[in-house]
Amino acid sequence: MAIAIGVIWLSRITLYEIRRTRTRWDEKSAEESELRREQRHEQRERELRLQIQRLQRPDR
């Protein structure tokens, strides 16, 4: 009986740690995804500004 209780206890601890790890990974993944989205947006803005500058220059 004591062995069964010990196994159940260890199983619960293991599952708890797995859930914590998955949550941490999910949060990190969401942060990285948001950072990549922001970087793409900033890059697109830079590209558009450069394109506008080129179009506004008088032809040489």
Image: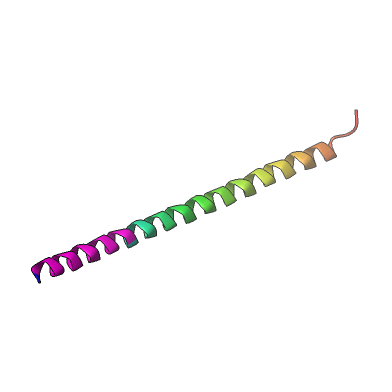
Total residue callouts: 0
**Viewer-proximal residue among 23 and 59:** 23
Q: Residue at x 59, y 46 (%)?
A: 39
In the image, is 4 to the left or to the right of 23? Answer: left
Toward which corner of the image does residue 51 lie, by quadrant?
top right
What secondary structure do most residues of the magenta stretch adopt? helix
Provide residue 45's location: percent of width, then percent of height.
68, 46
Q: Quadrant of the N terminus?
A: bottom left
10 in relation to 44, above or below: below
Q: Residue at x 42, y 57 (%)?
A: 27
Provide residue 12's location: percent of width, then percent of height.
24, 66
**Viewer-proximal residue among 26 and 40:** 26
54 in relation to 12, above or below: above
Magenta-span inclusion, residue 48? no
Farthest residue, direction bottom:
1
Farthest residue, direction right:
59
Segment tinted magenta in the rendering = 2-18
Toward which corner of the image does residue 24 lie, by quadrant?
bottom left
Q: Residue at x 38, y 60 (%)?
A: 23
In the image, is 26 to the left or to the right of 39? Answer: left
Magenta-span inclusion, residue 17? yes
Farthest residue, direction left:
2
In the image, is 38 to the left or to the right of 30? Answer: right
Provide residue 48's location: percent of width, then percent of height.
74, 44
Provide residue 17's location: percent of width, then percent of height.
28, 59
Q: Residue at x 9, y 68 (%)?
A: 2
Q: Quadrant of the C terminus?
A: top right
